[in-house]
Amino acid sequence: MAFILESFQSAFLLILRLDRELFNIMVLSLKVSGSALTSATMLGLPLAAILGLTRTPLKGFFLNLMNTCMGLPPVVVGLFIYLMLSRSGPLGFMGLLYTPTAMMIAQFVLALPIIVALCHSAIVSVDPVIRDAALTLGATRSQASLTVVAEARYGIISAIIAAFGRLMAEVGAILIVGGNIAGYTRVMTTTIALEADKGNFELALALGIVLLGMALFINSLLLIFQRKGMVRK
Amino acid sequence: MKRCYNFWSSVCLMVLLFCGPAFADDIICASTTSTENSGLFGHILPLFEKDTGIEIKVVARGTGAALEMGRRGDADVVLVHAKEQELQAVAEGFFVDRHDVMYNDFVVIGPPNDPAGIKGLGSAVDAFKKIADQQAVFVSRGDQSGTHTKELAIWKQVDINPTGLQWYLEVGQGMEKTQRIGNEKRAYVLTDRGTWLATKDQLEMEILLEGDPILFNQYGIMAVNPEKHSHVKYEQAMKFIKWMISDKGQAAIDGFRDKQGNSLFVPNAK
């Protein structure tokens, strides 16, 4: 079991040294997952609000679809995006395959169902009294909806944290659409997979610890927001 | 509400910043794990970039996947090791300007006690036949890679189709993982020498067969045919190919040593 200790040690050394290559890899990981997460939230949250607060046709079907897609295997998503973006595919003219943008698109597809499904359940569990109160106090329908969404922020941030966890840990999709090109599309998880492939297990584990540390840091930030949402209640 | 707008506008800005466009003077080279993971590209590409200013982005896959990338137009140039498949793809019109670049060789590795007794046979075909007769466990890449192609060619000469047999494990993984599975299973594995030299310290295996001419492993480079895919950067790809087969490129390959100081590839461009 000494290898765990050794891995923590070398993870610590990796962070202390923080050479340019590792730093760039960490930044790219955050860029790709961060931008996929923000764009998925920007689209997913309004979608969840519409599903939760209005009577939309096919609502049940759509929610069921989103719940199912939460379990989408990343490899399948990666393959689908690959075929779409490939030069022989319908979007090939854009030349996006093997770029960070392609990785972002794949992760966006992975994050969206989580955001929609979990935000929806956060929004519908807000006490309906709040909406009625807002309407009684003279709010328009859209203002009342915004009040409900604001009230659900605790659950919404939980959804964002869940989606972020999935994205930061994801390797299957970004490996296929990004190609793991050194210095260009190589991120934390694909580096870990590569080092594990090469048999550098301690290094791979150390990088995993670094990744976990990054996630811990980001989640702490999100938790601060979440607490704010709790206190006001 | 104002706060809200600030938040969303900063989010939009972030997204825009992160969606960088692709750059002009770089090309994608589809290649194999043996060239990337051994560190060969890390050694020669900086030299090439200094000479020409062209940046090469390497996507390392098995030979089958790398050729498919080229066929689909998702790469500009490929460097792989399955000469017959390469020539066939050239004949089909997917690639042009194929050149031999370098070679190394395959070896058969296995548990030191050699349960099938292939040590000293000298012929890979005889060794494979013996492994099949003894039903000794054999771990195969099973991924259409160059190594897998070579292995299947040998089985064909033995006149055995091992697919589905109980002692024959097709794992569908890269070379290093296949070796490790072989190590755990006390099995025989066909591997390229470069990967073996890089990983042998982690394995309780040894070379049981080497030097048979059938185990010769030729690497070739070729450009994706610009007539099939008009977007490929043929000009830059040709600069890379010409550099690789030039005296300078060949010397760079010759000068490459792995971490233990082994020479892994022998240049042989004509």
Image: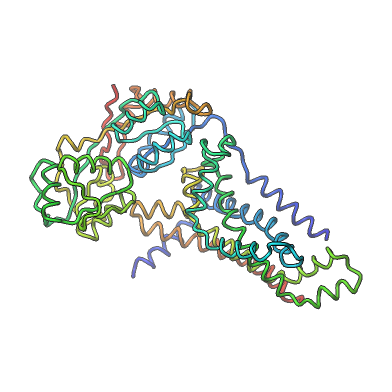
Along the line of sight, the residue nearer the viewer: A201 or A174 = A174
Rendering coords of residue B103 (x, y %): 26, 33
Could you tell me which quadrant the C terminus of chain A lies in? bottom right
Left or right: residue A136 versus residue A104 is right
Q: Quadrant of residue A146?
A: bottom right
Residue drawn 28% across the image and 44% down it: B148
Along the line of sight, the residue nearer the viewer: B184 or A63 = A63
Residue drawn 54% across the image and 61% down it: A166
Rendering coords of residue B121 (x, y %): 8, 44
Residue drawn 33% across the image and 31% down it: B86
Q: Quadrant of residue A164?
A: bottom right
Rendering coords of residue A47 (x, y %): 70, 60
Rendering coords of residue B85 (x, y %): 31, 33
A180 vs A48: above or below: above
Q: Residue furthest front?
A: A57
Q: Residue furthest right?
A: A138
Residue drawn 21% across the image and 50% down it: B162
A139 vs B141: above or below: below
